[in-house]
Image (cartoon, rainbow, N blue to C red):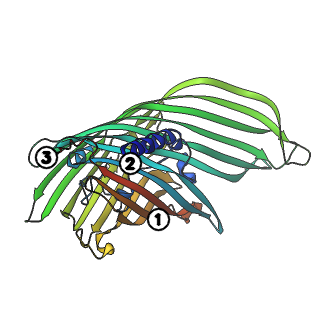
């Protein structure tokens, strides 16, 4: 691939990525809480390992970008470009009724560039959270039956710039500064079965923006001749975002056939309403044991202080979250010549989360099994390519207490390029 072609590819990907993250990438009714479902901002390499991040540096012979712990940037030895897409199918069940939904989007667009032999910077664009749902519930107002309809779409993206450096022989530190931005649209209505009654509808549009910061620390030591142990800690600081939006409440009735809405009047209209969103502190502590280019195994424990989340001055009932992730990778023979399958990275993992949602006297938990492959492609002396495939098979919620159970299959495809863009060549 020539230098010109690389530049065209990267510019095109960046421009297309600016709008790709703004769309909703979920069909979960649980995304109605807070600012939506938190995406995790992970590449397929991490997701395939169950979401390992805190103690993960370079999991293979290729340089890789681990956004969740910026201390890992100090392990980037060669300029790295990574782009990927996401697709998922979710089956929603409540009682004996089920339906399915499909979502797809650009997943990430990231760069890693060495600054010195022991430091590197990284920047890019990744999803942060997403809202997307459309459901209804039935009730009674006096003797009248009424349907409550809820819908939403939108998401928040994360543009980040980070730097990681070795602060000693065994210690690495790093930090990300990120700008969150996006739009969230929500609507709710009350519709009476009797078409002679007036119905009501409220639409709310919000633009979200603000700065957040991530901090990372890693300690790496050799526990034998070929095996390293890495202990890591990563944190996202508590940050205040700005929210600006509009609110419109209208009254309407159904036409004679009951298949169209006829507006009567607007009872409330608020424009440029300013508020704030307080994001909580997030912590992740974990480790990996790794034999370079051969195998690795690790685990992460995470805690989110979502009781401190605020919309204005109100916590909308969120609780603290906890999560456990375990995963591993095996590469049979990175130097194999005659057997391609021995060059492949085989990844596996498991994760379990007690989310920040508590409904009907029950915690909303989720769990998933993850699998993935790292497929190296033909390379030359200065450029290396790999396709990373990953899948998550998981469940969120349950059928107990008349709740919604989600069973999902998510697919991730990433393309990694390692290239010595800034190497100075000498000619005889």
Report whether residue 316 is seen: no
Q: Tell me where residue 247 appears, x and y as whole percent.
A: 64, 30
Q: Secondary structure at mark 1?
A: strand
Q: Residues within 10 Å of mark 1 (few under 14, many from 20)?
A: some
In the image, is 285 to the left or to the right of 87? left
Q: Tell me where residue 384 appears, x and y as whole percent.
A: 31, 56
Report whether residue 304 is seen: yes
Instruction: Give residue 123's quadrant in the image.
Output: top left
Q: Secondary structure at mark 2?
A: loop
The answer to which of marks 1 and 2 sits earlier in the sequence is 2
3 vs 2, front mark: 3
Residue at the image point whose x is 57% and y is 24% from the top: 273
Using the numbered discs, state the Cα–Cα distance from disc 1 to disc 3 in whole angstroms: 35 Å
Q: Residues within 10 Å of mark 2 (few under 14, many from 20)?
A: some
Using the numbered discs, state the Cα–Cα distance from disc 1 to disc 2 in whole angstroms: 21 Å
Q: Nearer the viewer, residue 218 or 300?
A: 218
Q: Tell me where residue 52 appears, x and y as whole percent.
A: 31, 57
Q: Nearer the viewer, residue 372 or 247?
A: 372
Residue occupied by mark 1: 394
Q: Secondary structure at mark 3?
A: strand
Residue 416 higher or lower than 374, as above or below: above
The answer to the question of whether label 1 and label 3 lie on touching residues, with beta carbons closer than 8 A, is: no
Residue occupied by mark 2: 320
Residue at the image point whose x is 66% and y is 36% from the top: 203
Instruction: Give residue 224's quadrant in the image.
Output: bottom left
Seen as rendered, the residue at the extreme front is: 428
In the image, is 208 to the left or to the right of 118? right
In the image, is 62 to the left or to the right of 155? left
Q: How many marks?
A: 3
Q: Nearer the viewer, residue 254 or 371?
A: 371
Residue occupied by mark 3: 171
């Amino acid at each position: 691939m020539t230098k010109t072609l690389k530049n065209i590819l990267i510019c095109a990907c960046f421009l297309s990525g600016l709008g790709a993250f703004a769309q909703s990438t979920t069909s979960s009714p649980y995304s109605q809480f807070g600012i939506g479902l938190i995406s995790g901002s992970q590449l397929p390499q991490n997701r395939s390992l169950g979401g390992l991040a805190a103690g993960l540096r370079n999991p293979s012979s290729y340089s890789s970008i681990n956004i969740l712990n910026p201390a890992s940037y100090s392990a980037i030895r060669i300029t790295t470009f990574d782009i990927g897409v996401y697709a998922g199918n979710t089956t929603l069940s409540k009682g004996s009724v089920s339906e399915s939904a499909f979502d797809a989007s650009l997943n990430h667009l990231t760069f890693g560039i060495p600054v010195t032999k022991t430091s590197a910077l990284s920047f890019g664009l990744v999803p942060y959270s997403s809202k997307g749902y459309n459901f209804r519930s039935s009730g009674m107002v006096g003797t009248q039956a009424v349907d409550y309809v809820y819908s939403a779409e939108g998401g928040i993206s994360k543009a980040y710039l980070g730097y990681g450096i070795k602060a000693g022989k065994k210690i690495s530190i790093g930090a990300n500064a990120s700008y969150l931005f996006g739009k969230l649209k929500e609507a709710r209505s009350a519709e009476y079965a009797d078409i002679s009654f007036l119905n009501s509808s409220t639409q709310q549009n919000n633009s979200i923006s603000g700065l957040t910061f991530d901090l990372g620390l890693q300690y790496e030591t050799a526990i034998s001749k070929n095996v390293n142990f890495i202990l890591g800690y990563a944190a996202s600081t508590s940050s205040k975002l700005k929210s600006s939006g509009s609110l419109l409440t209208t009254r309407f009735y159904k036409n004679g056939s009951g298949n169209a809405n006829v507006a009567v009047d607007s009872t409330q209209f608020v424009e440029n309403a300013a508020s704030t969103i307080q994001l909580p502190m997030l912590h992740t502590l974990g480790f990996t044991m790794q034999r370079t280019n051969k195998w690795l195994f690790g685990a992460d424990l995470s805690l989110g202080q979502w009781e401190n989340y605020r919309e204005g001055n109100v916590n909308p009932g969120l609780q603290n979250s906890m999560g456990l992730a375990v995963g591993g990778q095996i590469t049979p023979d990175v130097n194999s010549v005659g057997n391609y399958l021995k060059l492949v990275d085989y990844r596996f993992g498991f994760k379990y989360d007690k989310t920040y949602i508590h409904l009907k006297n029950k915690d909303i938990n989720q769990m998933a099994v993850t699998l993935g492959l790292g497929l190296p492609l033909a390379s030359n002396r200065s450029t290396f390519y790999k396709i990373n495939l990953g899948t998550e098979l998981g469940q969120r919620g349950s059928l107990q207490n008349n709740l919604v159970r989600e069973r999902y299959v998510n697919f991730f495809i990433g393309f990694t390029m390692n290239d010595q863009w800034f190497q100075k060549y000498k000619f005889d």
